[in-house]
Amino acid sequence: MGLAFGVPVMAAGGWIVWGLQKQHQKNNSDRLQAIFYQLVQQDKGHISVLNFAIAAQIMPEEAKQYLNKKDRELNATFENNERGGISYYFDI
């Protein structure tokens, strides 16, 4: 009889964990988007990987991936500086 109750409880627990993970991902996505738009507006369309990483408190590689995604969505231009850093320019 314990097994009959255990399986639905485990399945429900899995759904709860999945739902919490999805909510966390959405909250993080919303947070990154807010930081992105704030920096783009603040710097008149210019944003660097390092500035975004610092403001969002994420690793530079994650910041670069996020900005590459935004570049594809918003058709930004970018350039590499003399030290290998990447800066993006979004039309605002």
Image: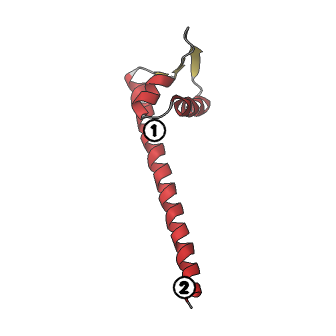
Residue in the image at 40% along x and 20% along y: 43
Element assignment for label 1: helix
**Looking at the rendering, which quadrant does residue 68 occupy?**
top right
Seen in the picture, residue 83 relative to 23 is either above or below; the reply is above
Q: Residue 79, how many percent across, how many down?
A: 58, 15
Q: Which residue is mark 1?
A: 32
> Of the residues under marks 2 and 1, which one precedes in the sequence?
2
- Nearer mark to the viewer, of 2 and 1: 2
Residue at figure coordinates x 62%, y 31% from the top left: 72
Asked if 25 appears above or below 35 in the picture, the reply is below
Name the residue beneath numbered marker 2: 5
Residue 24's x, y, as percent? Answer: 46, 52
In terms of depth relative to the viewer, which is nearer, 12 or 41? 12
Q: Amino acid at mark 2?
A: Phe
Specify the amino acid type for callout 1.
Answer: Leu
The secondary structure type at the circle numbered 2 is helix
